[in-house]
Image (tube, rainbow, N blue to C red):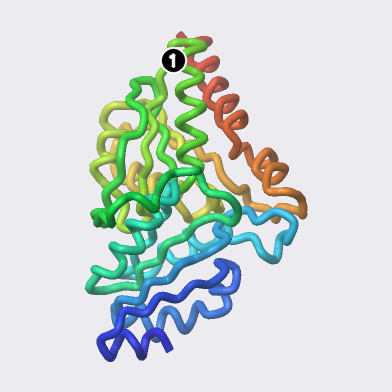
Amino acid sequence: MTGGLAKNGMIPVFAVYSTFLQRGYDQLIHDVALQGLPVAICLDRGGLVGEDGPTHHGCYDMSIYRSLPGAIIAAPKDELELKNMMYSAMLAESGPYIIRYPRGYGEGVDWQNHKYSQVNTGEGELLVPGSDVAVICAGPVANRAREAALRLKEETGWTPAIYNIRYIKPIDENILECARRDFKEVVTIEDGTVIGGLHGAVAEYMSSYKDSPRVTALGIPDRYIGQGTQKEQRQECCLTEEGIHDFLAGLNEKKLKKD
């Protein structure tokens, strides 16, 4: 239906649980993506969903839809980015324009008193400058990575550079090139499966060059995550501020031992 509306000049917005769109994958390909139609798809409950359990985790979306030619996949870090990405989707001339965001509370950002602003497709941002390791994040987990990096800097002087990639597809190759050129180690962090998603995109880019940095991943591992609270599930996958802090601290310890 949204494909038909877009074909006739409208800009439809389809809001759906991430896990439910999996059942419409063939329709998304044939009725929207194949024709490059500007349909905005808002994927609610991206990532770990808590008590609804394994049947409702929206952890496969980034890896599933990254394979679609012409698709745009956005992962806002907070409410304001979500607002502006939805605005940007209304200006897109082709699609699908997929925006995925998690279940639960936002970051507390004052989004209502900001004017709409277009987010350049495929353009990320540097959240925390650093020189020791490049950390590339997708979605609200970028905020946890920022907290972890600032804490590490205060504790040890070690400075991870934290990037908010914003778009899984098209991905910001300027950020990837900076990470490839300036760092010996890259970490990807995502509230999605590490197979095929952000980690897949970054690793694919790095593999096409000689002497690229090592790429390691934090995200949802290759197994089904059982029922529990979102906090418990994120702790299990090391996607909390504490988990990210400890993971990055471990990298620093390994580096010190080598040195």
Q: Quadrant of the N terminus?
A: bottom left
Image coordinates for residue 241, horizontal then vertical, percent: 57, 32
The answer to whether residue 107 of the structure is visible from this angle is yes
Relative to 31, is 163 above or below?
Answer: above
Relative to 190, is 103 above or below?
Answer: below
Position of residue 11 in the picture relative to residue 195 (left or right): left
Q: Residue at x 63, y 53 (%)?
A: 48
The answer to whether residue 204 of the structure is visible from this angle is no
Image coordinates for residue 207, horizontal then vertical, percent: 35, 44
- Pick whichever, 35 or 116, lies toward us: 116
Three-letter code, disc 1:
Trp
- Looking at this rendering, what residue extends furthest in the front direction? 113
Image coordinates for residue 28, horizontal then vertical, percent: 44, 79
Q: Residue at x 28, y 62 (%)?
A: 88
Image coordinates for residue 231, horizontal then vertical, percent: 68, 43
Relative to 174, is 44 above or below?
Answer: below
Q: Residues within 10 Å of mark 1 (few under 14, many from 20)?
A: some
- Pick whichever, 173 or 38, lies toward us: 38
- Pick whichever, 136 or 127, lies toward us: 127
Q: Residue at x 46, y 48 (%)?
A: 139
Q: Quadrant of the C terminus?
A: top left
Q: Residue at x 60, y 36 (%)?
A: 240
Q: How many marks?
A: 1
- Name the residue tied to disc 1: 158
